[in-house]
């Protein structure tokens, strides 16, 4: 079914139509400086398409919550746990309900984590719920930055990965990304490049004008026109809009944002006793509690546990008393490493540990290390993740000392922290010539029950040219590592977790 919605008027006065069905297949990028009318354009698009397609809006400023009153969008507060947001997103797809994820009041890192959890929840929905959804992300440069900022690397990777999935792989799952940004230069190129439709508004910086002209296929000498565009005027191009660049004036909207651009207001006449009004305190000021500054945010639990785990400095120990029997004995580096390995093994022996986040496991590790009186500064979270990945692979002492395993550890650094456990599991099987792990085993190493995701991970490794996946004559899977000159024995991809009885004979 072809549906053309009215976005406004062209220069000749004709109606500017946007093909919704084509937009779902080709995605849209909106660019314009602050005050150019981006939010107005998105609101027009959402209002006009609301009767035809399910909508999900990632709203960092809470401007689009007013859609709920007229069009029935569910407003989801982003101040929830990541698991809650993923569950809500999954149910949003199941029941085909339009919603607004408002991230107002959260700091930038919390906004990135919340948006990533919500987008991943929609992306991971079961195939039977892959209905078409228009996913609008305002201020997309916050969630897919071209360079690292002041947020942690984990938050940036999670958010950028979710946005990349939306724009690069979302189409087959029914997710059509509509992203709006103030500056193209601040938006990750691999995210922007996946859009086939463009609406370019007013911009002033040379680098942004040049990129806008390149995306529209215009001569760079024509890029100066973007400085002269009025508020609400955009240049459109794309299969859902026009086959050649056309100027569009966006039409009016039915709803309004909670905030608007500031307007000039005349100042009131100054009273005669203005100095008395300013310098004489109000009696109520003495009864109100004085608020000097915002109290600092509570310290993360991991920081507190790490501090408690550190051994007590000798300088604060009483010098007049003899050392007590409970004083911690000095450990050699080998003994300390042995104790840490024992704690890691104990944590991973729990069958549910595979499905807990690294942050939860790290807190458990810090508590157990303190209980066992392991001296010294505890390992950082990044090092803990690395050690967990190595321990989960099941490598023995002899293999861990081999040259191939050291080369494998270096090779594993080319994948993100959350994928290293899966990568090293496959490497260990290849070096030991064991049967290729099943989808269920790979999924457990990644912390999920989804066999489909396990197959996607293998596809990802193959895309990065780290492995070669093929099958033998009986259809059993083999994973080869060209860099290591090693490969697994044939294994049944559909075997239950831990069952190698169907391995190669």
Image (cartoon, rainbow, N blue to C red):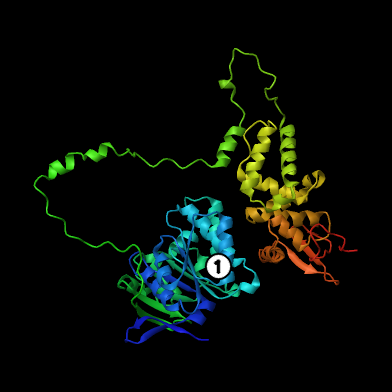
Q: Residue 273 falls in which quadrant of the image?
A: top left
Residue 177 x, y percent position in the rendering:
51, 71
Horizontal arrangement in the rendering, residue 110 relative to residue 435 (left or right):
left
Residue 241 x, y percent position in the rendering:
44, 81
Front residue (pair 415, 104): 104
Residue identifier under label 1: 92
Q: Is residue 115 above or below residue 9?
A: above
Residue 480 x, y percent position in the rendering:
77, 62
Instruction: Check the image and name the residue furthest to the right.
Output: 505
Residue at horizontal 78%, vertical 49%? 394
Horizontal arrangement in the rendering, residue 455 relative to residue 124 (left or right):
right
Q: How many marks?
A: 1
Horizontal arrangement in the rendering, residue 191 relative to residue 282 (left or right):
right
Q: Secondary structure at mark 1?
A: helix
Residue at horizontal 67%, vertical 22%? 327
Front residue (pair 324, 288): 288
The answer to whether any part of residue 145 appears in the image is no
């Amino acid at each position: 079914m072809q549906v053309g919605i009215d976005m406004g008027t062209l220069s000749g006065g004709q109606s500017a139509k946007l093909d919704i069905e084509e937009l779902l297949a080709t995605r849209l990028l909106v660019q314009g400086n602050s005050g150019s009318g981006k939010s107005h354009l998105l609101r027009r698009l959402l209002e006009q398409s609301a009767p035809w397609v399910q909508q999900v809006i990632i709203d960092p400023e809470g401007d689009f919550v007013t859609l709920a009153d007229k069009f029935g969008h569910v407003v989801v507060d982003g101040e929830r746990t990541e698991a809650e947001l993923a569950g809500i997103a999954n149910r949003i797809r199941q029941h085909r309900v339009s919603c607004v994820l408002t991230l107002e009041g959260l700091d930038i890192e919390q906004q990135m984590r919340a948006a990533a959890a919500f987008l991943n929840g929609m992306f991971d929905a079961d195939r039977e719920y892959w209905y078409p959804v228009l996913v609008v992300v305002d201020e997309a440069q916050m969630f897919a930055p071209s360079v690292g900022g002041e947020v942690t690397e984990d938050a940036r990777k999670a958010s950028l990965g979710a946005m990349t999935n939306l724009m690069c792989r979302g189409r087959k799952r029914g997710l059509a990304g509509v992203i709006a940004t103030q500056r193209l230069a601040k938006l990750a190129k691999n995210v922007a490049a996946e859009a086939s439709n463009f609406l370019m508004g007013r911009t002033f910086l040379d680098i942004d004008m040049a990129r806008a002209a390149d995306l529209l296929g215009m001569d760079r000498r024509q890029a100066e026109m973007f400085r002269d565009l009025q508020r609400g005027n955009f240049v459109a191009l794309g299969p859902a809009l026009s086959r050649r660049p056309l100027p569009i004036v966006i039409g009016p909207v039915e709803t309004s944002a909670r905030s608007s651009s500031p307007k000039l207001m005349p100042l009131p006449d100054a009273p005669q006793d203005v100095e008395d009004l300013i310098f004489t305190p109000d009696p109520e000021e003495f009864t109100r509690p004085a608020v000097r500054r915002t109290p600092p945010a509570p310290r993360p639990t991991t920081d507190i546990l790490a501090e408690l785990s550190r051994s007590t400095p000798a300088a604060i120990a009483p010098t007049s008393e003899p050392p007590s029997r409970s004083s911690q004995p000095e450990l050699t580096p080998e003994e300390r490493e042995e104790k840490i390995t024992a704690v890691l093994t104990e944590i991973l022996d729990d069958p549910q540990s595979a499905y807990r986040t690294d942050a939860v496991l790290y807190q458990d590790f810090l508590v157990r290390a303190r209980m066992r009186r392991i001296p010294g500064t505890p390992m950082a979270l990044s090092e803990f993740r690395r050690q967990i990945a190595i321990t989960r692979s099941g490598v023995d002492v002899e293999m861990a000392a081999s040259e191939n395993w050291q080369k494998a550890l270096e090779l594993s650094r080319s994948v993100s922290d959350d994928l290293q456990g899966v990568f090293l599991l496959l490497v260990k099987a290849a070096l030991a010539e064991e049967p290729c792990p099943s989808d269920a085993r790979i999924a457990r190493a990644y912390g999920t029950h989804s066999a489909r995701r396990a197959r996607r991970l293998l596809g990802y490794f193959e895309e990065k040219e780290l492995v070669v996946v093929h099958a033998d004559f009986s259809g059993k899977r083999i994973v080869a590592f060209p860099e290591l000159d090693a490969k697994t024995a044939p294994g049944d991809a559909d075997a239950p977790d831990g069952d190698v009885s169907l391995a190669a004979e």
